Image (tube, helix red, strand yellow):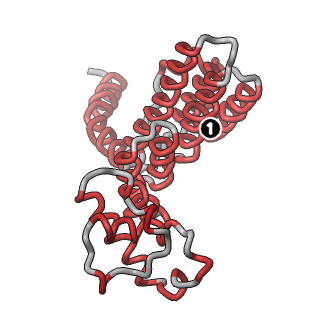
Amino acid sequence: MSRKFLGLLVFVVFGFAKLPVEDRVLSSLREQKLIEAPLNLDLRENLGQMGFAASLGGLRSLVASITYLQAYVAFEDVDWGRVDSLMTLTTRLQPHEPEYWSDASWHMAYNAASNYMNNQELRFAIRNKLFRDYIQRGIDILDEGLRYLPNNPQLLTRLGDIYRDRQVDHRKAAECYLAAAAHGAKSYYERMGAYQLVLLDDRASWEKAYAILKKEYDEHKAVYDRKDMGRSSVMRDLPILEQRLNIPADQRIRPAVPLHLIK
């Protein structure tokens, strides 16, 4: 056996031997988000050869910025299908950037949905279906984003907004706001969750809302006892909850809303 052939054989055997080690190292780096996972080859047709080559060359962030700007142009052109496609590319290229997921859902659940609902050239049944479909598309985008960014407060608050404003699902809105507050969102969102719980019809939700709002009141009593705070949401909802939960009179706050508004 010649030295050249022996050297080649050793090189090949060594190459195969180190593949499992390299795979484990790459997997570990991806789990720690130190490097991105390989780009899905299905994107090649959508990105074009230059964009695809650039993304493989480590310029994902740059290509994502370009597709994001293109999506904004499509938004100005009221081309919702193109907005969705370009924002999908953007989130695929930079899946750990919450702003992209948030904006993608906003375009669908708010801009596209409202545009179709207000389009008087379409029959109401069609407008209503498109309105609901695009709201659901916005929710689906956030659900996908949360698989990449579990418990991300920005995505959870956006999802809570959609459930509150667009689908009018108070329970899901409350769950999203409270989860966001538990994972780093401003404390304001805990109160937002409580306000949604007040709108439900079960005692467990009222008790949870009462605990949150009473804690807020106790911590800032001097503020909420001012006359100009009588119309605040905390002072609006606490008397309602006290009435529903039969809180003893000596534990109640001073009613700040007319009693006939308390249900």
Q: Is residue 256 above or below residue 85?
A: below
Residue 150 relative to residue 204: left or right: right
Which x, y percent locates residue 122? Answer: 64, 12
Asked whether 238 or 63 is in front, the reply is 238
Q: Is residue 201 above or below residue 81?
A: below
Residue 191 figure quarter: bottom left
- What residue appears at the point 62 percent right and 27 percent down from the top-left corner? 112
Residue that numbered label 1 is attached to = 59
Residue 155 relative to residue 20: left or right: right
Which x, y percent locates residue 110? Answer: 59, 35
Residue 261 figure quarter: bottom left
Which image quadrant: the C terminus? Answer: bottom left
Which image quadrant: the N terminus? Answer: top left
Q: Amino acid at mark 1?
A: Leu
Q: Is residue 218 above or below residue 123?
A: below
Most distant residue in the front direction: 260
The 10 Å Cα crowd at callout 1, few under 14, some 14 to 19, many 20 or more, is some
Which x, y percent locates residue 187? Answer: 47, 69
- What residue appears at the point 58 percent right and 25 percent down from the top-left corner? 84
- Answer whether residue 127 is visible to the viewer in this image: yes
Asked whether 258 or 11 is in front, the reply is 258
Number of residue marks: 1
Q: Is residue 108 above or below residue 163?
A: above
Which x, y percent locates residue 213? Answer: 40, 71
- What residue appears at the point 43 percent right and 81 percent down from the top-left corner? 254
Element marked by disc 1: loop
